[in-house]
Each structure stands twice: as structure tokens, then as C-alpha cells.
Image (cartoon, rainbow, N blue to C red):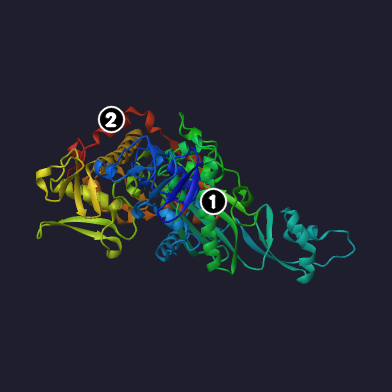
Amino acid sequence: MFKVKTKDGKIFETKEESILQVLQRQGVYLHASCGGKGSCGRCKIKVLEGNIKTESFFGISEKEKAEGFVLACQSFPGGDILIEIPDKLITVSERISTVKIEIIETILKEEEILRAKALRMTSSLSFRGGQYPEESLFAPVVKKLSLKIDPPSFDSHGDFERLKRSIQKELFISRKLAEKLSDFLRENNWSINLAITEEEILDFLSKKIYGIAVDIGTTTVVLALVDLEEGKIVDVASCYNSQINYGDDVITRIIFAEENPEGLNILRKSIVDDINALINTVSLRNKEGKIYCAFVAGNTTMCHIFWGINPKYIRQEPYTPTLNRYPIWKASDCMLLLEPQIPIYTLPSVAGYVGGDIVSGLLTTGLYKDEETSLFIDIGTNGEIVIGNKDFLITASTSAGPCFEGSGISCGMRATEGAVESFSYNQKTDEFDIKVIGNEAPRGICGSGMIDILSELFSKKVIDQKGKFVTDNSKHIKIFDNEARFVISSDCYITQSDIDNIIRAKAAIYAGISTLLEEVGLSERELKKVYIAGGFGEFLNIKKAIKIGMLPNLSEERFIFLGNTSLTGAVLCLLSKNFWELANELAQKMTYIDLSRSKKFMDEYVSALFLPHTDWERFRELG
């Protein structure tokens, strides 16, 4: 048994684990984008004393190696050791875990956006060929029912039977509630307020009825608290998905679940703890109500892990999930800190790589009821795409990688304070102007900033059509460890490898769109609208995204940013059971195309690995 000591005085014991595994087990998380495979080069630590066995130095320069830096995931103690963890290399979620109960903040701006969208959508819903009558638009799955029950007489009927007779409906009641019923009725003079579903009595009410909508994103988790009596969002909270400590993308996490005996349980506990922290946060801020149902949206892998279902076959051909449509399970089945009988609704998936988050997003767009054809795309770790109208819906997923969410890039980061969000060339000063979130010194680059940088460097011929640096064309290009970097500040830069990753990501998105358009026999110009969802969509510069060949060459007014459509759709399902029924119908209606088996997609992808594309005609200026 060896001891791993950190410079700040922590001591951990280990026998055969890597240093990364030792630290993770003790709640100290380094940035391990690859899930500990040694292929991202980001979990760097400095060995101050002791002997270690290191299997790979990938991503570590000769200078760093001489200073004692190693990869934690590839290094094993050969005895007692003393290590130093550079603060800037600790992942954000490790810092958040110490203040998780506080969560970040209420996103008031997002609350107003969601509320406006939910109300707008419910007022114009078209379903099964017609309009819902106005009175049925607001129809939550859990509702309040107030009753006055006749006191018992000598008719032999029990209290519960007389309650059901007042409701005129057969309902289930749990043993726990039945135990309280008789006393409750007598103490309240035979008056009772119930929280009920179509099938069950959930509780005797003393507070307002709330529900929660949860978006389980690969990188972030967002929760909205909804007043189901008044039909409005009352609070929103968010945090990072703690699973990022075990890998940036779903494939890495699936591998982690497969290869570690407790991997699935670790991943499941991470996401359940995150959601419970969010529940705790909004509950403490809104004590006048109680949560009686939840709608959860996420990609197929995230939903499987949330329910404790091994997603391993999603990674193996033919990429089959355990289930696409989930039963309405209970809070007790998923370890959420709610009453055990509370129903948990999971938005249905379409396939292994098109999940409930996309079905939820589709609800938000309304494109499923239009005569003309539109495109919906959610740009994140994967680029999920839907093309369709009222007659057809065709969908696919393309692996864009996590770079647009801040991972896999040397100075990549989420769209938080210190991130470069826009970048442009100033002809007067012959310099590049940057805009940083929070007006701080730049610490990294978020997704919208990456698009801007790529576009501007290409326009100013700092990089060529293949994305390679033209080293004579900019004073900002420096060589470090035999690799060219475009230096933005002392702490912020973009490397040749980073640019290659961004080009691969944009090529995958554009190739996915092109392939689906060809499947339905349409050209880009025939798209009525392009709905864009995803974390950085709101800040995306459309002209620059088109210039690098990521999006179709259409006029700007055809593009509509929708923000977090996964959460918005889940809110809509909370507000109206009609949306819940519609979500299940849309999931069944969508036709999935597996791009991994499409020769057309591969041809399109290779052609899109240039700026903007090998076919210049596609990106001529609009007339």
C-alpha cells in the first residue's frame, strides 16, 4: 500500500490504481477529457518526490517533462510520492462540487425566454390535424382537486370509497397515504385538496403544486421549477454535469461504465447528485410549493445512465439502446430526493444517438406542423439534425466532438466569464479585436469564439483553405514545442491541432445536413427556416459560420436561435399532457438515418474538410 500526498497536505492510500483514479476516488477531479485513456494530455500533475511508473507522456512537452510533469491517468506510484496539482488544471466541476448546494445562480433571462416560448407554443399548438380547444391547452399531468366529502353514515362505505365516489373515478392510493386518510378527513371537517394524476392520488395538499423539467446535457444540467396551478416558470437553476470528470463525451463515458466494475453506478450517482442539488436549491428558494412530478429530457446515453441502465450496446453496432420509450417510473426508482411515489416522465428517444432532448426540441420549433420544410439542428457534442414538415420527419446524428462546448481544445472553455466569445479584424489598427465574457482578460475560447477565430484567420489569409497556418502572414503566430500557435494573450491561444479539430467538427455538421437534404431530394435553398439549438447558438455569428462552411449558405433571416430547446420542450410537457402525447407521437414518426453506414455522408464529410468547402459554388454570395 502506497501513500499519495498532495502539496496542500492531503494524503490518500493506493495499491494498484493510477494517480488519476486515486484522486477521483477521493473527490479531487482533474480535467480528463478522454476518460483516463491518455489520449487528451490534460490531466497533468507535477511529481515533487518519489518514484512513479509512467506509461505515456502524450501532450507533455520536453520542458514540462524535465520539470516533473506527468499524466495522472498514465502514472502509477512505485512507493510513497508527493505531488502538486496546478490549480488551473483542476476541472471546473471539482470546484463546483464544493459549492454544489448553492449551484451557480437563477438564470432570470433564460426564465423569461422559456416562459415566453412556452406560452407562445401552447397558444398555437396544432395536433392531429386540428387545434386544441382553448380550455385544454393548459392541462398538466398532475393537477389540484378540491373536494367536500359527505361524512360517513351507516352505509358501510369506507372513507376512500366515498372519496372516489366524489371524484367519480377509480384511482390508486398508496398504503402510506391510505394510513393517513381517515384522520386527515376528520381533522379538516371532510374537506380535502388532492394532488392527482389520471391514475393515482399523490398527496393531500397543504402547498402549491410544482413540477420540474430537467435537461440532462452531456456538459450541463438545467432544471426549471414550474407552478402547475398558475402555469408559469418560477425558478431556473443549473450546474455542470459532474460526469465530465470521467469523460467529455458519451462514448468515453460508455467505455468508463463498461471497463470499471462500479463505472455505471459512479456515473449514475454523479448525475443524480447534480439533479438533487438543483432540486434542493429551487426548493429552498420556493418553500410555498411542493414538487409532484418531473419531466426529464436528455440524449439516449444520459437517460440510460440516469435510470441505471447500462448503455454499452449504444456504442456497438448496430447501436441499439435498451429502450426508446420509458415507462412512467417513480422517484424511488431513480433516487431523486422527492416523495417516492412522484411520477418521473422521460422524453422518448428515436435511436441510440437521437434522444429525448431532440424530440423535446422539436416540440419547441413547431416545424412538424408546417407545410414547408425546415431544418432543426442542435449543436453540441453531437450535431443532431431533423429535416421535415407536417408530412415527414427525418433525423440523424453526426459526431461533432466536444470542441464547441469547450473540450478537446487547448484553451477551450464553456461560455463563462473569461471566454473569448467574438473575434474580428480591425483594419485601422491592423489588430484583432476580441470580446470576452465578463470583460475580463481572456482565459480561453468558447464555441462562438472558435467559429469567429477560424473565419477571421481564413479571411485574412493567416490560415489557408486546408486550415494550415501561413506562418509569414501574422505576427501573432509563435512556435512552441514544434507546433504553431496563434497567440491571443499570455493565457489564451489556438494551435494547429485545435484548428484541425474545429474543421472536423464543422465538416461533420455540414455533411450531416447535406446528406439528409439529399435523402429527401431537396436543396439548401428550399429550406424555409433553420432552427438552431445548443449552448452557444445565441452568440453564433451566422455569417462567419457560413463563411467557414458549417451552415448552409442562406440569408440570415432564415436562421432562428432557440437556446435550450431540450428544457423548453420538457417545460411544455409539464404545462400540457397534450404535448407529452405529441412528443411520443413525434418520436414514432421520425425516420432515423444512420450516417455511419452512409457512403454519401463520408463523401460529403471529406469535401467539407476545407474552408469553406471543396465546392466553392455552394458558398457564393447570395444574390
Task: Give the residue number, with chain letter if any, for mark 2.
Answer: 603
Q: Measuring 32% from the left and 48% from the top, which residue is drawn there?
A: 404
Q: Residue furthest right?
A: 154
The residue lying toward the viewer, choosing from 475 and 553, is 475
The residue lying toward the viewer, choosing from 437 and 578, is 437
Could you tell me how many numbered marks the image carries?
Answer: 2
Label 2 environment density (alpha carbons within 10 Å; few <14, some 14–19, many ≥20)? few
Indicate the position of residue 477 as horizontal and vertical percent values. 15, 47
Marks 1 & 2, CB-CB < 8 Å contact: no
Task: Give the residue number, with chain letter if any, for mark 1.
Answer: 272
| Kind of residue sitting beneath label 1 | Val
Q: Measuring 46% from the left and 32% from the top, which residue is drawn there?
A: 319
The residue lying toward the viewer, choosing from 102 and 611, is 102
In which quadrant of the rendered view does residue 563 lie? bottom left
| Alpha carbon distance from label 1 to label 2 | 41 Å
- Residue 398 in the figure: left or right of residue 441: right
SS under mark 2: helix
**Label 1 vs label 2, nearer the camera:** 1
Indicate the position of residue 495 as horizontal and vertical percent values. 23, 45
Image height check: is 441 above or below 50? below
- Residue 433 in the figure: left or right of residue 595: left
| Kind of residue sitting beneath label 2 | Asp
Label 1 environment density (alpha carbons within 10 Å; few <14, some 14–19, many ≥20)? many
Image height check: is 472 above or below 98? above
Indicate the position of residue 575 as horizontal and vertical percent values. 53, 58
Mark 1 and mark 2 lie on one chain; the one further toward the N terminus is: 1
Image height check: is 61 above or below 133? above
